[in-house]
Image (spheres, helix red, strand yellow):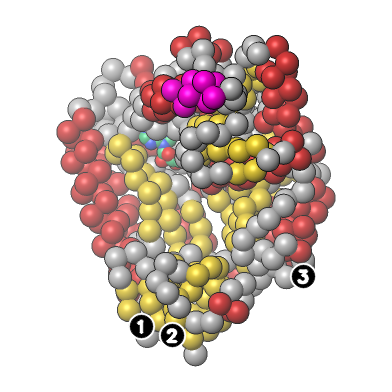
Amino acid sequence: MKKLFVKTYGCQMNAYDSAKMADLLAPLGYAATDAPDGADMVILNTCHIRERAAEKVYSELGRLKNLKAEKALSGGRMLLAVAGCVAQAEGAEIVARQPAVDLVVGPQSYHRLPEMIARAARDQGHALETDFPALEKFDSLPAPTASGVSAFLTVQEGCDKFCTFCVVPYTRGSEQSRPPEAILREAQQLAAKGAREIVLLGQNVNAYSAEGWSLAKLCGALADIEGIDRIRYTTSHPRDMADDLIAAHADNPKLMPYLHLPVQSGSDAVLEAMNRQHTADDYRRLVARVRKARPDIALTSDFITGFPGESDADFEATLQLVRDIGYATAFSFKYSKRPGTPASTLRKQVPEDVKAARLDALQKLLLQQQHAFDDSQIGRTVAVLFEKPARDNGQLMGRTPYLQPVHVHADAALIGQVGQVRIQRRTANSLHGVVV
Ligand code: 5AD
Ligand code: SF4
């Protein structure tokens, strides 16, 4: 067996891609290992979305170059691959800056890894694939080999929205949806391997559209698959929140009451400069419609503080939006300049300390809301899907319909089942309860 080490950065789609790459390389005799030392192949599956991503990759490559040299001294060869969005964005620049790299493979090309490995091994040269062959990769990937109780399934990739801060439309290409048959087949395979929850992934997952199928219709068909108890999807754009998807939150009992709906800012001026194509009130109205369909839905979002030109009043509008909506949890980031994006050339960049102070204030408010939401579960009995043993002996980790982690003393036989749990208390990041 050859040893394969994959290091994953960034989003859930990268985690899904990393698992797929490992599946793809298994028939070539590669088995996953959890450290790069002595590995026969190392893949850095990179993320380009925020902060000095490329720099981090180059410094990691510097360290790996030494391991590669050690391996060569003992007569072996370590293949070094850069995959993911930094590979897409930097391309040939990567091998120019770090010649120890053997392969550069973009997110749409990793199904060609076996061929690239063969080429790199044959001529000892570099192999580079960063085309956009429009989801061809999904037809070329093996069936899932293993899966947990909760499994990711990519249904859509790419983005046509062109928010002015974001690299995704450049690194992942335009919006593409996989055919429904292929998705349902993969879901059946996952269910047969023990998955009880399917998390549909896409950069703009609710823009899913193929052969007359919408995301809502897809969720309907998934709900009919034997063994699938829960369906989730992420990430959604407010503009693509179609009526049938909102209705599905009322009508499809397997569709979980949880929605990640990034808004980024609460200021119309900033939203306009970000090219988000909606106002803060559009978002408020949309949330009201979603809550009418599913009153208990847990809402989450992404926020950026210190977008170029953001004033104190703009930031206050973001805080006000957060107070108005009330989030279950949320992700927030300081704006970071991404090369090649329109916002990176705007002149009114916000000073670092202002960005940081705003982020701090926003995160305090969001954490208060998260704790309030978690506390509102105390004393209630909720359906928990048990996923795996928890770190504490004799405990299991499961999740509520609202995605909150719950720790419970329970028999491992419950893994993969939904049990009723009375929530007793909250710790910093999880709930604790008893099976009833
Ligand atoms: N700076 C800061 N945050 C960003 N995001 C995307 N691009 C940037 C950037 N240049 C955040 C957005 C997005 C999330 C995935 O990452 O909030 O929704
Ligand atoms: Fe990036 Fe905007 Fe597309 Fe999301 S919707 S991936 S933030 S361009």
Tag 1's secondary structure?
Answer: strand
- Residue at the image point whose x is 26% and y is 62% from the top: 368
Tag 3's secondary structure?
Answer: loop
Q: Position of residue 224 (x, y in %)?
A: 77, 67
Say if mark 2 contacts mark 1, CB within 8 Å. yes
Earlier in the chain: of badge 2 and badge 3, it is 3
Q: Position of residue 217 (x, y in %)?
A: 73, 57
Question: 31 above or below 198?
Answer: above
Query: Marks 2 and 3, how far apart in space?
Result: 28 Å
Q: Number of labelled discs? A: 3
Q: Amino acid at mark 3?
A: Glu
Callout 1: few (<14), some (14-19), or many (20+) C-alpha neighbours within 10 Å? some
Q: Amino acid at mark 2?
A: Val
In the picture of the structure, the residue carrying the numbered disc 2 is 434
In the picture of the structure, the residue carrying the numbered disc 3 is 226
- Residue at the image point whose x is 25% and y is 56% from the top: 365
- List the single residue furthest toward the bottom: 436
In the picture of the structure, the residue carrying the numbered disc 1 is 424
Question: 300 above or below 229?
Answer: above
Residue stretch in magenta: 66-74
Q: Main secondary structure of the magenta part?
A: helix
- List the single residue furthest toward the top: 96
